[in-house]
Structures are given as structure tokens and as C-alpha cells.
Image: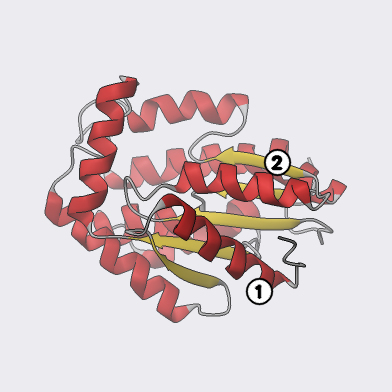
Amino acid sequence: MADPTIARPGRFLTFEGGEGAGKSTQIKLLAAALRERGLSVVTTREPGGSSEAENIRSLLVTGEPGRWDPISETLLLYAARRDHWLRLIEPALARGDWVLCDRFADSTRVYQGAGKGVDAALIEKLHVLSLGEVEPDLTLLLDLPAETGLSRSRAREDAAGSGETRFERMTLEFHRTLRAAFLSLAERHPARFVTIDATQGVAEVAGAVLDAVVQRLSLDRAE
């Protein structure tokens, strides 16, 4: 298999945030804007993104909240992430594509680390073992109160009926902890993160996302 630490000509952008932050919607809108500029774009998600990682996803996002102990959950996530990286993300970046990913390693640092108490040093060791020193070129944190996000997420699930509700059914306090941890992570890594107010309307958030990409990655802002 290819070395996951190779230099990449493409760009790797991740979207992070709590439940119901609108990541999937904003990824679609940004992908369309980038394609209008003639860029080749791949959109993907975690957990999942490759066929085997999608199989692991079903184990992680369905069932009872206490289905996995925190370390087992973290190991499953990194098994899925390594497969996703090797089979989809790394080849796309090597081709020069822009990859937009709904969640990546920061979600593990927050959900399993801050939220469930897995030692941060253990998570970083697993990260290096699985991926080397890989980090996104830019991480867009869509921030909103936990109550608002959970309300949106539950309404969406009621309409879709996917059954992927395991994390949504965890406590409100858990989700408040996640929000604080995401914001703390963004403060510690300002060169990589941009925090965007996700309580705004979809168009306003999309504009802020595009502005961040233009400014951070030296992209022309064609109107």
C-alpha cells in the first residue's frame, strides 16, 4: 500500500462540528462553487467513504449509545479512517483533486477524546500509526449551540429514517462538551481552522465558507 505521508498536489478540506451543524449541505455547496472554477472535487464522509469503511460506519452510528466502550470505538474509527485514506482520499489528492470530507480526525479527538475520555496521547499515537502526520489543509468548523444542532438533527432523522441516531441519543451535556472541545481545538490550531457561525442561514454560511477557502488557500473568488 502507498505511504500515507506522501506529498500531495491536491487540497484536503474537512468540515467539523456537532450534530445538525449543516456540514453535508455546505460540502455540496462548496463542491459546486469549486467545480465552477474548473477544479476536480471529491466529496466524502467519515466514518465511511470507502466500501469497507462504510461497513464499519454501520457499526458505529447505529444501535444503543453504550454499544461500544470508548477505546473499542476509537479503534474502529481508525480502522475505517485508514481504509478511507488509502483507498479514496490519498489517490484523489495524488491526482490533484480537492477532497472535501465530512468529519475527519478532529471528530475523534473531540467525540472520543473530550467526550468519552479516551487519552489524547493514545488518539495521537493511533493517528500517526494509521496515517502518519496527515492533517487537512483547512478545517471549517461549523459552530452552533448543542440544543440547536440536536433539534435540527432529530428533525432530519425523523424525515429520513436512516437509523443513524446513536450519537444524537447521547446526553445534551455530552454534546455541550463536544462544542466546547471543538472550539478549544480551533483556538489551539488557528492556522488550520476557521470557525463559522452555523446559526446563520444556509446561503450566509456558504458565503462564509467560500470566503474562508478563498482567503486561506489563495483561490480566486469568481462571482
The residue shown at (26%, 42%) is 152
Secondary structure type for disc 1: helix
The residue shown at (50%, 77%) is 189
User: What amino acid type should be assigned to the residue bearing mark 2?
Assistant: Val
Q: How many marks?
A: 2
Residue assigned mark 2 = 42
The spot of residue 149 in percent (x, y) is 26, 49
User: What amino acid type should be assigned to the residue bearing mark 1?
Assistant: Arg
Residue assigned mark 1 = 216
Q: Is residue 218 visible?
A: yes
The spot of residue 74 in percent (x, y) is 40, 46
The spot of residue 191 in percent (x, y) is 58, 79
- Nearest the eye: 148 or 201: 201
Specify which label sits upstream in the sequence, 1 or 2. Answer: 2
Query: Which numbered marker is on residue 161?
Result: none
Q: Is residue 14 above or below residue 72?
A: below
Q: In which image quadrant can residue 187 be found?
A: bottom left
- Farthest residue, direction top: 161
Q: Is residue 102 visible?
A: no
